[in-house]
Image (cartoon, coloured by chain):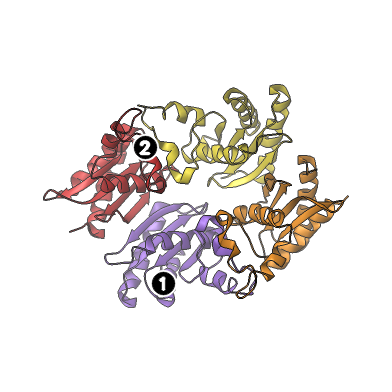
Chain colours: A red, B purple, C yellow, D orange
Amino acid sequence: MTLTLADARIIISAAEAKVSEVGQPMNIAVVDAGGNLISHVRMDGAWLGGIDISINKAFTARAFNIQTKDLGDNSQPNQQYYGIQASNNGRIVIFAGGIPLTRNGEVIGAIGVSGGSGEQDQAVAQAGAKASLT
Amino acid sequence: MTLTLADARIIISAAEAKVSEVGQPMNIAVVDAGGNLISHVRMDGAWLGGIDISINKAFTARAFNIQTKDLGDNSQPNQQYYGIQASNNGRIVIFAGGIPLTRNGEVIGAIGVSGGSGEQDQAVAQAGAKASLT
Amino acid sequence: MTLTLADARIIISAAEAKVSEVGQPMNIAVVDAGGNLISHVRMDGAWLGGIDISINKAFTARAFNIQTKDLGDNSQPNQQYYGIQASNNGRIVIFAGGIPLTRNGEVIGAIGVSGGSGEQDQAVAQAGAKASLT
Amino acid sequence: MTLTLADARIIISAAEAKVSEVGQPMNIAVVDAGGNLISHVRMDGAWLGGIDISINKAFTARAFNIQTKDLGDNSQPNQQYYGIQASNNGRIVIFAGGIPLTRNGEVIGAIGVSGGSGEQDQAVAQAGAKASLT
């Protein structure tokens, strides 16, 4: 069981709808159960540096079945995963904006968002994640 | 002058419409004038290996303002760019499926497609490129 | 709207002029609106390690439309972007010396400087950035 | 004995002067005796993909004290260096446009040019190399 492109588009569309509220254009990416990119969009004016980060937040969230902000809490100095961002050829992101997507308790993909503050990215990712449940 | 996300979606949509004709699901990517990704979609069932290739075909077509199949002709053994695929940190693709997109004679981005034979990829990329002109 | 090579030379020249004051030879780089290098100079005696850093400070400043020192403040342990330097294939620099360049409120490129202390790099980058406004 | 930034600027300036004749804007790079970049310029409209290639043509020419086109002849299928472009982390370029620069029979740096056909790149690199002798 994995996400389809149609699912990814619904998720991205819901995330984009949230952007008008947070007021910062975003990069939004969705990966499947294999951690592989299904779709990415960079809204006009969104950070160039967020292309890589949005895709890899989604990868990270699926790779460890955890929200990237929670992985981040565990990856601070003296915490149990400190240094993890150097693994996986630089694909691990340890700050807010990546959320695993589940169906019937199983992780079937993830969303990653990059373009603003940690709070903004997280809010947009949550809007996308919420749409994946319907 | 560069492509917008709205432009990219029109281009991708036209490319997707062509896929039903060629009969092979595709990865489709569009980059802007700076060679940076605007949007990528992987159709259900399309190659995982085509994620990177579609994005980098689009990058290559913009990086050298040339169709990737034409760059490929020039990059065969004993031709003038032989070995070019080792440059740019492995981002150069030298087979069919990447096409620069122009407006008023200026390159404003590119499309890259990966998922089938060279002919299939090229046909889908051309359908996308054609849509960018309207 | 992006920087031209002529713009980049004016910016680099102004940065070089500042070096005699700070007393440390520098690497100076300017990128365009797409984050792509327009020009780099390494002054005689400047750090070899600063070639990559100056180019990537400029990239970083454009990639996130932020001064690298401010990104650095946000990327310390327990801050919102902690770990960001592992992203973008190692191209993100999170200490002083990279400044986005704007025209009419739009980011059109960036300057990156590397060769001395954070304060020295920042002073030279500022001198270059100031010249971009005229 | 190595090239200075002043030398590099004379070399680049001579190369740029040649561009008006060959009719294709270029990326031009000069490295020192250590193979490390002294200066790079991308002329307005020159290929984005040529940034990496010009810098690495110069690196290659110094790394093996040979013109890149001659290294290319030796790197075709069934020749003695076939496959060499996969070495040195992708920094080896095996087509025309990179020339070592010598003084009193010693290699003191190199020039690399990228932006047009092999012949065009070579002509511009030669113009730069010639200026390094005076």
Query: Residue B91 at x, y = what percent?
Result: 50, 58
Is residue B65 visible in the rendered structure shown here? no
Query: Residue B66 at x, y = what percent?
Result: 56, 66
Q: Distance between the Cα atoms at labels 1 and 2?
A: 35 Å
Q: Amino acid at mark 1?
A: Asp
Pointer 1: what residue?
Answer: B121
Q: B8 and A92: which one is in front?
A: A92
Which one is in front in this view, the residue at disc 1 or the one at disc 2?
Answer: 1
Q: Is residue A88 left or right of residue B62?
A: left
Q: C111 and B51: which one is in front?
A: B51
Pointer 2: what residue?
Answer: A24
Query: Residue C1 at x, y = what percent?
Result: 56, 45
Q: Residues within 10 Å of mark 1 (few under 14, many from 20)?
A: many
Task: Tell if the residue under mark 1 belongs to the same chain as the one under mark 2.
Answer: no
Chain letter behind tag 2: A
Is residue A1 positioned above or below A80 on the image? below
Residue in view at x 27 percent, y 56 percent? A34
Residue in view at x 63 percent, y 27 percent? C116
Chain letter behind tag 1: B
Task: Assign a secondary structure to mark 2.
Answer: loop
